Amino acid sequence: MSPAAFGLAPATAAAPVTGAVIGLPDFADLVDRVGPAVVNIRTTERLKLGGRGGADGQPGEEEMQEFL
C-alpha cells in the first residue's frame, strides 16, 4: 500500500456511520481518492520451464492445440 493510501486508510475505517442503513462502501468515491496511487509488483525469481508439458501436470503446447 502506498504511503498516501496508508494515510487515508485509518481515517476511512474510523469514519462514523451516519443513517440507519449500513451498506457497501462507495467504491467510485474510493477510486477517485486513491486511484492515482501507483503500484508496482516485481519478482526476483525466474521459473525454469520443463521440457514438454506445462508446470505441475498442465498440458503443453501440443496438447492444448489438440484440445482447441
Image: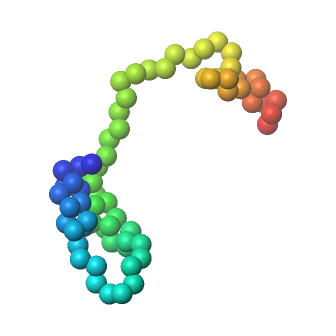
Can residue 61 be seen here? The reply is no
Horizontal and vertical percent position of residue 41: 35, 38
- The quarter of the rendered structure image containing the C terminus is top right
Q: Using the image as rendered, state which of residue 53 and residue 12 is in the foreground.
A: 12
Q: Residue at x 80, y 33 (%)?
A: 67
Report the side of 8 relative to 39 (left or right): left
Camera-side residue of 43 and 6: 6
Residue 23 placement (x, y as % from top left): 41, 76
State the residue lying farthest toward the bottom. Answer: 19
Relative height, residue 13 to residue 37 (above, below)? below
Residue 54 visible here: yes
Q: How many marks?
A: 0
| x and y percentages locating residue 12 in the rendered image | 24, 67
Q: Quadrant of residue 52?
A: top right
The residue furthest front is 20
- Which residue is found at the position 20% from the left and 61% from the top? 10
**Image quadrant in which you'd find residue 42:** top left
Q: Residue 8: x percent and y percent?
A: 21, 61
45 relative to 17, above or below: above
Q: How is the image coloured?
A: rainbow
